[in-house]
Image: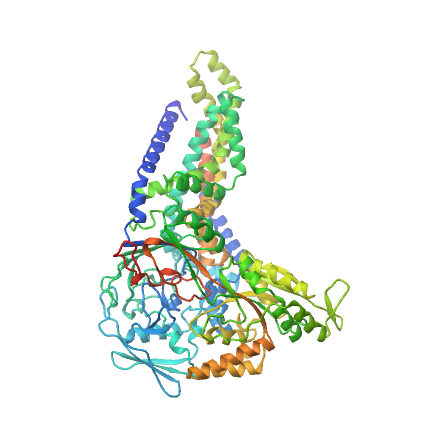
Amino acid sequence: MTGRSIRVAVATTLVTALSLTAAACSNPDSATSGSGSSSASAVVGIAYEPDSLSPLLGYGKDGNSKIFDGLLTLGADMKLRPALAAELPEVSADGLTYTYKLRQGVKFSDGKPFGAKDVVFTYRTILDEKTNNASRTELDAVEDITARGEDTVVFTLKYPYAPFAQRTVLPIAPEHIAGKQDVNTGAFTTRPIGTGPYVLTQWSRGEKISFTANPHYWGGEPEVKKFTMAIIKDDDVRATRLRSGDLDGAILPPNLAKGFADDKNRKTYAATSYDYRTVTLPTHNKVAGDTAVRRALDIAVDREAMVKAILNGAGKPAYGPVPTDSEWFTRGTERTHDLAAARKILDEAGWKPGKDGVRVKDGVRASFPLWYLSGDKLRQEHALAYASDAKKAGIDIRTEAGTWEVIEPRMKHDAVLAGGGSPADPDFDQYTLLKSSLAGDGFNNMAWYDNKAVDTAIEAGRRSGEAAERKKAYDTVQRELVKNPGYTFLTHIDHLYVVDDRFGPLTTQVEPHDHGLASGPWWNVEKWSTESAGGSEK
Amino acid sequence: MARMAGRRALFAVPVLGVVTFGVFAVAAASPFDPVKAYAGTAGLTASQENLDQLRANLGVDQPLVARWWDWLTSALQGDFGDSSLMRQPVADVIAERMGWSVLLAATAFLVAILLGTGLGVLAARRPGGWLDRCVSSVAYTLEAAPAFWLGLLAIWFFALKLDVLPAGGLTDAASEVVTFGQVASHLVLPATVLGVSQLPWFFLYVRQGVADALAEDPVRGARARGLSERTVLLGHALRSGMLPMLTLIGSRVPELITGALLVETVFSWPGIAAATVGAATSVDFSLLAALTVLATAAVLLGNLLSDLLYGLADPRVAFDG
């Protein structure tokens, strides 16, 4: 390198530095115009990025997708409402046929009309085993779907399945686009076209998903014209960007949401959820499989303390998959924390305290391992609290961390700190958690729970179309869980969102375990009003 | 010189082949299950039958060698397969993200080289002087500081306290078009953080090299001939002091790639790095193999580049061709 070339290099450095500085100086203007003091645009920070935006691969299966509509949709009260269907379905007396009349005049955002063939195409494609849809099991009941004319579709089921209508919230894809490409990897998976309130304008992976209002939306054009979901996986960065004004709202863990409690311009919304944390008590474990041990653990744990200490109060004690504020919850099945009673149960069952304080029966030490997903702080804290409560009753629980690959082969004999929950119907959680024939089937019935009375009741619950009869069935399940708990349910977790006040007051839906795109106060962003100073939900 | 480049390129072919096989073998031996990764949370409620079908559809039930051979033969015909993680062709995944990563890494590299060289020369002029002591201790601290920590610190200071730079993303979150000004302002923080995290190595090498050169005979001779201090420093000392740094350029490439990984995550930068982590943890064979080929090629190119530069800068070094 010569002297001259070095001078050139130095000059280049200076120019680069100057241009970078200049760019930096010009930034504040663009930043304010960007994050929008205008209410017609909203930017929210989410922690989760979908793998695909194709409903055929499972996107938006629980309803409420911004780009698509399902035949039905769930309101704020979690009641089904017609969307692409003109009305709620007609169900045959035997519960085997569901007939949907379709809404007329609906168009996809590319201008092509929506019709019965799109519905048939969507369901048939999902049911096709060549389609890589991991949620296909949810449509297990469907025997076939056919179009009757242009405006009617008919589902025939293999067995009566009462919650079936809840499954038809899944988004409808356009046959004229999605039908012409590889369903697993085609362009439709990243650049979808739907009938929904918003049109996807850009999906920059790892950065953001941008939407613009669909001016021809059959439900009326949304007032929030631009809606952006910024993908920020790190909780701290999300909180920081919310504070810097880059975001209008974000999902936050309880400890970071607390930092916004005194912020006058931002409101914290706590969405109640079906998101439970539970300990599986596998039947094949000599200790955890003993009904006396299960019952003792069920009352030895201090759920209230967990809600207070681990969730900062943002949650509720759980006694089963159904949260205590649900209409499906059976009053009187709450278990209060009672250590003395737990000890008595164990004493009576022959579990006598050994030298080190851990109980022993017939030479078996009351001890078993409890696995939790490594890196999941919330699960770790639940596991540690559970182990410490159990210790007081004389049961030694060894907590261990691992990935699902490590945990899964051990699920038959070891306890696991599991999570789950889907709110639309009590069948969704209870059937897969408790049905004895599903023991060890993938992640279904992880505890290998086996209870004839429960089997009969959940089968009745899914087959009966009568609300009263279903309620009776799920009451039976919850009462059986008191007598023989296959799991120790610990908490139901509230999901916390902090949102700029100018959009409020907003509502939230009851949320599932998944933090999907549909969750949060923006579940109905298409209905937000921006007229008044504050703006409010229509 | 051309012969050396040609020979290296020939040598790269078997290396890349072996590397791809290695990736398939390591991925197959890893405890991660591609089907579980593909299914995500849906997999936690899916039936075994559903999961088995998925395994067959994804082709991961095939033996390792067959899978690798399939991938390799179609890759040679320009088809890099489909990414199971991203649900789109691997070529699309790379095309969409590669440019942004290259932009970030190149800018960072430039920052590191230019700043490192500049500061190194200044420090070498007065070893033990106040500038040398300040910059050296900062450099040692930076060497130990992880890039993501620097990133968080930079966001906190520049975006939150001073509010002069955006905290993340390629453009403002609400903006839908990618403009030069937007990208430039959003590039400043991630590129500086990544550049600064690489800076110490260049600084310390140049400082040492130039300081050594200043003590050598040719430089003393030049001084004796009455050449100006600037000519001595930049024309003579820097020229021989740069030599170890040129080797460094090649060897820093892998470090730059791992650094970019963390920086991209912290700044929500839509580059290829995040996809690499995802590909590895979800055992996305096709994507992982393609990315590994690219990373290997980058390292080989980096080495070739530093050897070429070395040869150009120092006539005593012969090209190995």
Q: Position of residue A156 (x, y in %)?
A: 37, 83
Q: Position of residue A307 (x, y in %)?
A: 53, 61
Q: Position of residue A337 (x, y in %)?
A: 60, 67
User: In the picture, residue A192 is in which quadrant?
Assistant: bottom left
Residue A97, placed above or below residue A54: below
Residue found 39% across the figure and 74% down from its top? A167
One can see residue A403 in this view: no
Q: How is the image coloured?
A: rainbow
Residue A251, placed above or below residue A426: above
Q: Nearer the viewer, residue B170 or A130?
A: B170
Using residue A430 as the reference point, say whether residue A29 is left or right of it: left
Location of the N terminus of chain A by quadrant is top left
Tally of marks: 0
Q: Position of residue A2 (x, y in %)?
A: 40, 24
One can see residue A103 in this view: yes
Residue found 40% across the figure and 67% down from its top? A58
Give the farthest residue toward the right. Answer: A355
Location of the C terminus of chain A by quadrant is bottom left
User: In the picture, residue B108 is in which quadrant?
Assistant: top left
Using residue A200 as the reference point, say whether residue A396 is left or right of it: right
Residue B166, placed above or below residue A507: above
Q: Nearer the viewer, residue B227 or A325?
A: A325
Q: Nearer the viewer, residue B168 or B16?
A: B168
